[in-house]
Image: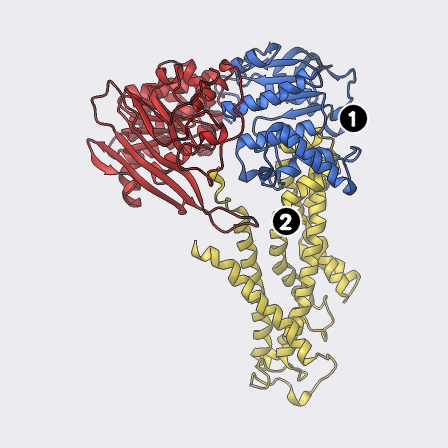
């Protein structure tokens, strides 16, 4: 399933095709343990320069596993198949088949970077933000004046150069988030992955963080925003261009954000929107399934029988695609 | 009635973060408490739960004003107020299974389900509560490290309800949760409120949520920055 | 990574061998301190006497084992006593807070300010030559480390929401301490206990070496070392070598176990990210 983009003529900066992640489970601890966790199954999407793709879904749907897989940072018991083609001026390569050393020395931080969850705790508490940013700059862009470059990065994310001289505990949540984005931008990556960058932040900070990622994309990056905060996407129109909805390790629906949020094609998306305070706070019955016991196709019909056909056929209409058809219109 | 009258709250004597707060909640009512980060919402929650003494003013629970806080509050009055916290992971003992977490208030001496002889009654009660909050059987036997934040917060809600509180103080209980879990937990609390057995203080920075959930909302003003060079510990 | 993972099994292996030697050999051979055979005094190691004999003609292979047994027993009892005492005092002090905490911590400072050996000597001097006195002198001077560790752990947990939730649920102070705080601090306390073991072995040896511990005819690593002094001048190197070797091996093995266990406890849990 490809997140088609009508306006795009450019090549995708990152084309993920059929990405599948399995975790082998170890010894049983006193109870029967199924052999594998189906963390992600047949996930495909494209990230285009200048666009933000939001990957949404409930917690525990395998969203965060994707960043681990793309950055080559999954634990040893993971098996990753599929393809993730990174292409750009520096050449093309497949993230999933590239060796550890190459990923570490030539790809991570330089061509694809991560904005982590809870920025404040991912900074070293005993060194100033500047010391940490300059260290990264010296490593990623040798030959430049680290101080000058750190200042310009700070400015780019909306921080005063003086703010960099603070220690992490002296930064507010929003400033720490900006430092994290500056760290990700230090190596001028083509692709930025943001893994729940807004979790636990209050609303003004959420909105500012989304705005910041928008600016990053406008400057030419391809951005993947992983979030469970659909409300924020709805509240800040234009923050993201495309939306992909994930459930039980599979993409159920994708398309331009405005269209998907206004008229969801999959029953699950509809229920996600109805669960928002603005949608009426209607809880989704049941819980996301165990990732160890999944049907072959769309797992949604197991939770809400009769709501979709449970098929594994992807239906495409223009830029939108929906896995399996809804059978009855839910309350929306 | 759980009420705060002209309450000043803060962690340092003489440095109140919240000044002159008046707040009243009756069973069957949801009162929202909103405010930006650092406005003292959590401090107010702890004072209402009588985990922290107010710097001035008073907190009364059903007309009773406790002379002390924490263990000094008589047990009957202490259990009348339950709390839910922002981080479910920090709110449970990591060594206990979810079933044991939920059963904690049921084991306390003085409750009818306490003691070795009442194991059966206790597990029946745990099963009822688990069903109410939507925790399925298998999850109850797991440790906190083996479940998601949302499932853990469900267990925390079951534990809070197990102490049969008349008031529930929810301190950003949905901040770490996805929309669907938020809706589910709010739904459970709402049912109790509608039955008239529970009064809720819903603390959140999510105004959309409070607009839907709360009957009325008290807004805390942004706390004036104490020192501009050192942002108050919001980075945590 | 590799040597970290080896520490624990290696330490346990050596320790098991030492304990087997200390318990089985005296049990099979039988030890009677009063049996002396001066015709066999100070024999160098030989197939008949693998560790040689001492100045009274007693077999050192058996006597070292018996000495090790006594030393280990004293060490285990001391470590257990100090741990229990330290854990309870530390947990109560932290949970109570206020003046109780301040008082207890000043007491701990006071005990730590006096050299342990000096304090031990005073205690042993009051009840000369009894096992109980040695055990008490070591236990009463070493609980303070455990108390500090447990107190720090409990303090860090005391204000966590899960304790707040227990308080609101109606739990008494004692219930919170024994159900939530102590169990959480216990792993750290156990590591401290293991690390105390070699310390206790050395203390016992030192006291006995100084003639303040067990009477000379009762074998312990300390009395054996003390005896070795006179033999050493007459060329009996083995009288020093084997008891000293078993002391050093015990220390190293226990230290390896201690740091190995600590590594295991502090290592982040794998699979936690798999939620």
**Residue C259 percent across, percent down from the top left:** 54, 54
Chain B painted colour = blue
Task: Specify the quadrant of the image occupied by residue B117.
Answer: top right
The residue at which mark 2 appears reads as: C189
- Around disc 2, counting alpha carbons within 10 Å, would you say few (fewer than 14), some (14 to 19), or many (20 or more)? many
| Numbered badge on residue A10 | none
The residue at which mark 1 appears reads as: B76
In the picture, which quadrant includes the N terminus of chain B? top right
**Residue C153 percent across, percent down from the top left:** 62, 41
Residue B170 in view, yes or no: yes
Between A258 and C85, the one nearer to me in the picture: A258
Task: Specify the quadrant of the image occupied by residue A211.
Answer: top left
Disc 1 on helix, strand or loop?
A: helix
Residue at 49% in and 15% down: A279
Relative side of A17 to B4, left or right? left
Between B115 and B229, the one nearer to me in the picture: B115
Write down the chain letter for disc 1: B
Relative side of C220 to B181, left or right? right
Q: Which chain is yellow?
A: C
**Residue B127 percent across, percent down from the top left:** 66, 34
The correct choice, above or below, for B34 with respect to B159 in the image is: above
Between A135 and C267, the one nearer to me in the picture: C267
- Around disc 1, counting alpha carbons within 10 Å, would you say few (fewer than 14), some (14 to 19), or many (20 or more)? few
**Residue B72 percent across, percent down from the top left:** 77, 28
Spatial CA span between label 2 and label 1:
35 Å
Relative side of A155 to C153, left or right? left
Q: Nearer the viewer, mark 2 or mark 1?
A: 1
Q: Which chain is red?
A: A
């Amino acid at each position: 399933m490809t997140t088609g983009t009508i306006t795009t003529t450019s090549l995708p900066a990152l084309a993920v095709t059929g990405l599948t992640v399995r975790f082998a489970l170890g010894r049983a601890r006193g109870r029967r343990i199924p052999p594998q966790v189906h963390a992600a199954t047949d996930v495909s999407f494209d990230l285009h320069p200048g666009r933000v793709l939001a990957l949404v879904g409930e917690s525990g749907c395998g969203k965060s596993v994707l960043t681990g897989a793309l950055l080559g940072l999954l634990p040893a018991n993971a098996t990753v198949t599929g393809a993730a083609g990174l292409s750009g001026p520096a050449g093309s390569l497949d993230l999933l088949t590239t060796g550890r050393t190459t990923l570490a020395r030539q790809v991570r931080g330089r061509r694809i970077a991560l904005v982590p969850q809870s920025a404040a705790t991912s900074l070293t508490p005993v060194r100033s933000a500047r010391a940490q940013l300059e260290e990264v700059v010296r490593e990623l862009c040798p030959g430049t004046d680290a101080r000058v470059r750190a200042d310009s990065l700070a400015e780019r994310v909306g921080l005063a150069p003086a703010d960099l001289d603070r220690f992490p505990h002296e930064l507010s949540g929003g400033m720490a988030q900006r430092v994290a984005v500056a760290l990700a931008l230090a190596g001028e990556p083509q692709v930025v992955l943001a893994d729940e960058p807004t979790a636990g932040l209050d609303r003004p900070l959420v909105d500012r963080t989304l705005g910041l990622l928008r600016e990053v994309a406008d400057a030419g990056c391809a951005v993947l925003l992983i979030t469970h905060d659909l409300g924020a996407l709805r509240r800040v129109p234009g923050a993201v261009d495309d939306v992909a909805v994930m459930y039980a390790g599979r993409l159920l629906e994708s398309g331009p954000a405005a269209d998907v949020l206004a008229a969801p094609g999959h029953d699950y998306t509809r229920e996600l929107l109805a669960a928002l305070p603005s949608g009426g706070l209607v809880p989704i019955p049941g819980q996301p399934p165990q990732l160890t016991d999944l049907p072959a196709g769309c797992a949604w019909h197991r939770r809400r029988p009769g709501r979709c056909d449970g098929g594994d056929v992807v239906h495409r209409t223009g830029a939108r695609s929906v896995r399996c058809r809804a059978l009855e219109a839910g309350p929306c | 009635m759980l009420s705060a009258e002209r309450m000043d709250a803060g962690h340092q004597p003489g440095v109140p973060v919240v000044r002159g707060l008046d707040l009243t909640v009756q069973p069957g009512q949801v009162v929202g408490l909103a405010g930006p980060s650092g406005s003292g919402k959590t401090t107010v929650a702890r004072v209402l739960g009588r985990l922290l003494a107010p710097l001035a003013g008073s907190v009364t629970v059903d007309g009773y004003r406790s002379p002390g806080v924490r263990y000094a509050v008589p047990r009957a009055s202490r259990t009348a107020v339950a709390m839910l916290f922002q981080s479910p992971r920090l709110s449970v003992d990591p060594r206990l299974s979810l079933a044991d977490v939920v059963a904690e208030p049921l084991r306390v001496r003085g409750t009818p389900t306490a003691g070795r002889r009442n194991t059966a009654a206790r597990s029946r009660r745990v099963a009822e509560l688990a069903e109410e909050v939507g925790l399925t059987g298998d999850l109850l036997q797991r440790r906190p490290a083996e479940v998601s934040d949302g499932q853990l917060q469900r267990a925390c809600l079951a534990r809070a309800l197990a102490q049969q509180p008349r008031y529930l103080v929810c301190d950003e209980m949905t901040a770490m949760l996805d929309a669907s879990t938020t809706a589910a937990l709010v739904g459970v609390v709402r049912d109790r409120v509608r039955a008239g057995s529970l009064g809720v203080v819903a603390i959140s920075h999510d105004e959309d949520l409070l607009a839907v959930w709360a009957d009325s909302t008290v807004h805390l003003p942004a706390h004036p920055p104490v020192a501009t060079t050192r942002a108050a510990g919001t980075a945590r | 990574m590799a040597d970290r993972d080896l520490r624990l099994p290696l330490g346990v292996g050596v320790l098991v061998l030492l304990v087997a030697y200390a318990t089985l050999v005296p049990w099979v051979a039988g030890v009677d301190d009063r049996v002396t055979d001066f015709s066999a005094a100070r024999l160098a190691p030989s197939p008949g006497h693998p560790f040689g004999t001492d100045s009274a003609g007693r077999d050192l292979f058996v006597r070292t084992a018996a000495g090790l047994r006594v030393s280990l027993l004293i060490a285990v009892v001391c470590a257990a006593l100090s741990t229990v005492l330290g854990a309870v005092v530390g947990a109560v002090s932290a949970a109570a807070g206020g003046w109780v905490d301040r008082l207890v911590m000043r007491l701990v400072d006071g005990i730590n300010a006096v050299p342990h050996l000096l304090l031990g000597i005073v205690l042993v001097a009051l009840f000369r030559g009894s096992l109980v006195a040695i055990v008490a002198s070591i236990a009463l001077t070493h609980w303070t480390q455990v108390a500090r560790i447990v107190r720090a752990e409990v303090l860090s947990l005391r204000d966590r929401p899960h304790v707040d939730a227990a308080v609101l649920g109606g739990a008494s102070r004692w219930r919170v301490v024994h159900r939530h705080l102590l169990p959480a601090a216990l792993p750290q306390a156990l590591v401290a206990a293991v690390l105390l073991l070699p310390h206790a072995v050395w203390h016992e040896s030192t006291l006995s070496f100084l003639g303040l511990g067990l009477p000379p005819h009762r074998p312990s690593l300390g009395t054996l070392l003390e005896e070795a002094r006179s033999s050493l001048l007459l060329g009996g190197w083995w009288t020093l070598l084997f008891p000293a070797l078993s002391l050093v091996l015990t220390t190293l093995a226990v230290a390896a176990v201690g740091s190995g266990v600590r590594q295991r406890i502090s290592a982040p849990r794998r699979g936690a990210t798999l939620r």
